[in-house]
Image: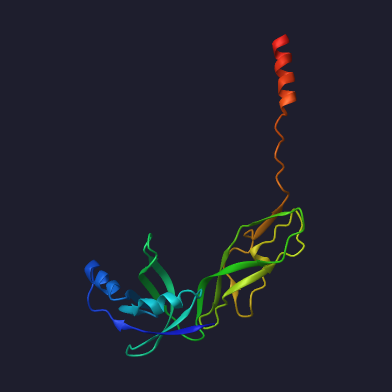
Amino acid sequence: MSEVRIAAEPRTEFGKGASRRARRAGKVPAVLYGHGTEPRHLNLPGHDLMLALKTPNVLIRLEGLDKDNLALPKSVQRDAIKGFLEHIDLLVVSKGEKVEVEINVSLTGEVKAPGVLNQELVTVTVEAEATHIPNGVEFDIEGLEIGATPTAADLKLPEGVTLVTDPESLLLTVSAPRVEEEPETSGEASESAEAAAAE
């Protein structure tokens, strides 16, 4: 599990104007909450945060506060058009604590021809120790045949990680290729037209 250190500073100004000023200065407004504590309002360096968020479920160690806080991103708001970070909610976590997170499901291998693969679940929710969250889980589809319907229960999760998603949720299906009906040839069309005219 990767851990990234980011310098944090308490936020003393609030409202849209203050948030805009913070973003102009290259900072991202953030809220840190959890463990029954009052939410804390922070500003984080935008570039460092953007790099950190490239890793799914990244563990962020916030430095520069009264104590180091280990946190997990819970909600990230981005500008719908330009994509820059507008705001982030962070959840305080501690070593040994269990948290629920979404992880990516990636497929390896090839299904047996002529089967067509349809992936139904691209992520699953799991419970894992905050400092041992897997980056994702792989599922081997090598040789699966038409009619195969593995479920979330078939995923092999790392030790200490438990599935929260319904185990019966369909992971993927392998179906037969669709056969398009061939259009009438021009010869058949003209024959049917002549027959209709003769009636």
In percent of the image, x 56 and y 71: which residue is there? Answer: 126
Locate the N terminus by quadrant. Answer: bottom right
Please state the horizontal and vertical placement of residue 123, each as a whole percent of the image. 56, 65
In percent of the image, x 55 and y 74: which residue is there? Answer: 127
Q: Is residue 169 left or right of residue 47?
A: right
> Relative to the observer, which residue lies in front, 93 or 135?
135
Figure coloring = rainbow
**Residue 82, above or below 55:** above
Inspect this view and state whether residue 199 appears: no
> Relative to the observer, which residue lies in front, 116 or 31?
116
Inspect this view and state whether residue 18 appears: yes
In percent of the image, x 72 and y 35: which residue is there? Answer: 182
- The total of numbered circles placed on residues is 0
In percent of the image, x 38 and y 66: which residue is there? Answer: 77
Snapshot quadrant of residue 115: bottom right
Snapshot quadrant of residue 11: bottom left
> Relative to the observer, which residue lies in front, 66 or 2?
2
> Relative to the observer, which residue lies in front, 111 or 32?
111
Please state the horizontal and vertical placement of residue 140, each as a whole percent of the image. 71, 68
Q: Residue furthest top?
A: 199
Q: Is residue 32 left or right of residue 154?
A: left
Please state the horizontal and vertical placement of residue 138, each as a whole percent of the image. 65, 70
Q: Is residue 42 left or right of residue 113?
A: left
Locate the C terminus by quadrant. Answer: top right
